[in-house]
């Protein structure tokens, strides 16, 4: 976190709590669990920069999506302020950390299944410390077939970090993607099955039901 | 449709000492009256979630198929049934369907086509079953998933804690779960937790031949439910500690302890034990512990009953002389020993035999004078825990402790 000389734009824990709609106790807990970076201590008071508000909003947003705290930590611990904003935009729907109204059993189950899909995606690697721009020149001749990483500009380390992370984040292979899909098997007759991918199923429910009834009647006649 | 439910409570003694803290035990009794045979019943909305993993080959799957067909025979056109078979993939044999005569025949036919397959995605099958019945959930119907397995969950979500949280959250949202473990290879700790947190029953089925009768028994219960999602809410006045005994699922807020009892059938009696620790206070004052039973009747309407137990403060010397209901203390102690046995069996299952034996022996030492046969049985269990148990012993001891803790008759 960059130090600022002026303390006017820094918040006390109470101010931060009020702006982010959480309790000071929660802020201390998140800090001890590594979800928030250690804040700046000036004399008696702990001071928080304004971007902590967005971090707390991001944590709340990820909690609403059923993510457990250690997973939230893995995703956000190494993000800088820009990264936090970007992820909030990506998730959409910037809402205050209000507790969601108790939802129906159906919605709860959908939430579990979505969380499973997300957890089964390979996490973006989060280096524990900001990665410094490589001092050495780019390595000679990369191995054949591998994508050639270009040396990042020797400027601001934070830019390099984001850039490098995008380069090295593994893309799930086709096989991995297939394994994470959820298919339903519906028997139509002995030895005959209909396979439906679960995300399609919700849209085409009525058509699928018709198809099943018709198919079954064919095999029974 | 008014169910006749009663709530009463008594304590081992009603005096508490003014100069020192006292511990008392309250026995809460919830009873649902018998119903005449002709009485209307609530429509069912169930899912049969059947393990068809490789280990289910042979007579196990055969008896499960038979049991599932019997269950359908007991249902009528007002009831809904969904049937899921799972191994490492989830197969919907029937989405939630009204059990008309033709639908019944079709579903029974499809059940008999099941063949055993791969590994065990228990969570996937269970959650899919819950999803199908959740869509049909209504205030008037009884929504429950019946989950059967013969082995270990080794695909999908396998973490016991995580699954038990889902069971609890689903129960809170109206979807209950009962579990059926067949044979010796399933995880009894997992199935018990799912059923307990899920507001249903757990069954240990030793021999496959018993499967049909156990399913009939569960169906029998479902068909005679008169009070749904019963909850005993106990007031915890300032300075008074109230704890639930026997490890029943519960929730605590600043002023109340809520114990989840699940659904109750006509003719059923539940006994719940709480330990109360009173603070010091002046002679002549009293403290009242109130309990309120809430439940939904068959039309989905909420009903309440209340009762209370009062403790009066007296000098300790006088309190020591007063009579005590020893039989009540013995009943409560049995429930606590059963809870300790569950914990000890969990440790033993994980290989921590010495600790398991220690837990059991510590509980025995702390229990008031038990009838000799009971004490002897638990002493035997303690030595078995220390030596390590055969699977059959472990499952039988676990199931026995489960039934004692639930204390339903």
Image (cartoon, coloured by chain):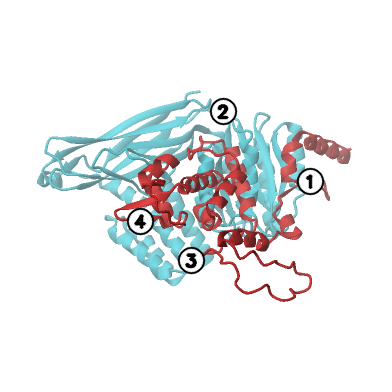
Chain colours: A red, B cyan
Residue assigned mark 3: B350
**Residue B185: x %, y % from top left:** 59, 62
| Quarter of the view holding residue B255 | top left
- Local packing at callout 2 (Cα closer than 10 Å; few below 14, some 14-19, many 20+) is some
Instruction: Please give the name of the residue rendered at 43% of the width and 56% of the height, measured from the top-left corner.
Output: A3
Instruction: Please give the name of the residue rendered at 46% of the width and 61% of the height, measured from the top-left corner.
Output: B346
Location of the C terminus of chain B (image quadrant):
top left
Q: Chain of mark 1?
A: A
Circles 1, 4 touching at the beta carbon (< 8 Å): no
Residue A205 left/right relative to B363: right
Residue assigned mark 2: B140
Name the mark on residue A41: 4
Residue assigned mark 1: A187
Furthest residue in direction top, as rendered: B1
How far, Cα to Cα, is label 2 from label 4? Answer: 58 Å
Relative to residue B293, is residue B385 depicted above or below? Answer: below
How far, Cα to Cα, is label 1 from label 4? Answer: 65 Å
Relative to residue A103, is residue B392 depicted above or below? Answer: below
In the structure shown, which secondary structural element does the residue marked by tag 2 occupy? loop
């Amino acid at each position: 976190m960059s130090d600022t000389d002026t303390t006017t734009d820094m918040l006390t824990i109470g101010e931060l709590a009020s702006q982010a709609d959480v309790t000071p106790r929660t802020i201390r807990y998140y800090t001890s669990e590594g979800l928030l970076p250690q804040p700046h201590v000036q004399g008696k008071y702990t001071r928080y920069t304004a971007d902590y508000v967005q971090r707390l909003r991001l944590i709340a947003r990820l909690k609403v999506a059923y993510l457990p705290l250690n997973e939230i930590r893995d995703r956000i611990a190494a993000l800088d302020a820009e990264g936090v904003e970007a992820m909030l935009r990506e998730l959409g729907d910037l809402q205050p950390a209000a507790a969601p109204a108790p939802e129906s059993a159906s919605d709860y189950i959908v939430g579990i299944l979505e969380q499973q899909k997300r957890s089964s995606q390979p996490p973006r690697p989060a280096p524990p410390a900001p990665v410094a721009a490589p001092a050495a020149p780019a390595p000679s001749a990369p191995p054949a077939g591998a994508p050639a990483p270009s040396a990042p500009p020797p400027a601001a380390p934070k830019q390099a970090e984001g850039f490098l992370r995008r380069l090295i984040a593994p893309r799930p292979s086709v096989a991995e993607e297939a394994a994470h899909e959820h298919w339903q098997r519906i028997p139509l007759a002995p030895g005959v099955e209909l396979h439906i991918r679960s995300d399609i199923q919700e849209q085409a429910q009525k058509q699928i039901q018709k198809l099943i009834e018709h198919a079954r009647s064919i095999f029974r006649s | 449709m008014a169910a006749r439910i009663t709530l009463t409570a008594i304590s081992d003694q009603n005096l508490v000492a003014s100069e020192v803290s006292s511990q008392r035990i309250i026995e809460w009794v919830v009873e649902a009256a018998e119903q005449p045979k002709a009485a209307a019943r609530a429509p069912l909305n169930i899912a049969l979630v059947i393990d068809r993993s490789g280990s289910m080959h042979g007579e196990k799957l055969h008896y499960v198929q038979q049991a599932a067909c019997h269950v359908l025979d007991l249902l009528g056109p007002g009831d809904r049934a969904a049937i899921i078979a799972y191994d490492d993939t989830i197969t919907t044999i029937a989405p939630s369907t009204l059990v008309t005569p033709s639908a019944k025949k079709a579903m029974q036919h499809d059940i008999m086509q099941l063949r055993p397959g791969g590994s065990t995605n228990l969570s996937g099958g269970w959650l899919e079953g819950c999803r199908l019945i959740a869509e049909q959930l209504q205030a008037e119907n009884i929504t429950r998933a019946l989950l059967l397995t013969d082995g270990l969950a080794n695909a999908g979500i396998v973490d016991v804690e995580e699954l038990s949280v889902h069971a609890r959250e689903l129960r809170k949202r109206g979807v209950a779960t009962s579990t059926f473990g067949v044979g010796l290879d399933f995880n009894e700790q997992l199935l018990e937790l799912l059923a307990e947190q899920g507001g249903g029953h757990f069954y240990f089925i030793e021999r496959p031949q018993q499967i049909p009768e156990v399913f009939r028994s569960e169906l029998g219960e479902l068909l005679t439910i008169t009070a749904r999602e019963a909850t005993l809410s106990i007031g915890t006045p300032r300075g008074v500690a109230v704890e639930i005994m026997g490890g029943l699922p519960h929730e605590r807020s600043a002023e109340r302890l809520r114990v989840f009892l699940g659904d109750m059938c006509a003719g059923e009696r539940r006994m719940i034990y709480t330990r109360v620790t009173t603070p010091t206070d002046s002679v002549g004052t009293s403290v009242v512990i109130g309990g309120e039973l809430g439940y939904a009747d068959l039309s989905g309407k909420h009903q309440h009953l209340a009762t209370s137990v009062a403790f009066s403060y007296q000098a300790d010397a006088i309190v020591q002389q007063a009579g005590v209901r020893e039989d009540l203390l013995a009943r409560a102690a049995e429930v606590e020993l059963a809870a300790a046995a569950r914990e000890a069996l969990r440790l033993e299952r994980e290989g921590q035999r010495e600790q398991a034996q220690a837990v059991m022996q510590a509980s025995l030492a702390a229990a008031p004078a038990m009838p000799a046969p009971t004490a002897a049985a638990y002493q035997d269990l303690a030595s078995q825990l220390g030596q390590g148990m055969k699977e059959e012993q472990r499952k039988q001891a676990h199931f026995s402790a489960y039934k004692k803790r639930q204390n339903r008759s």
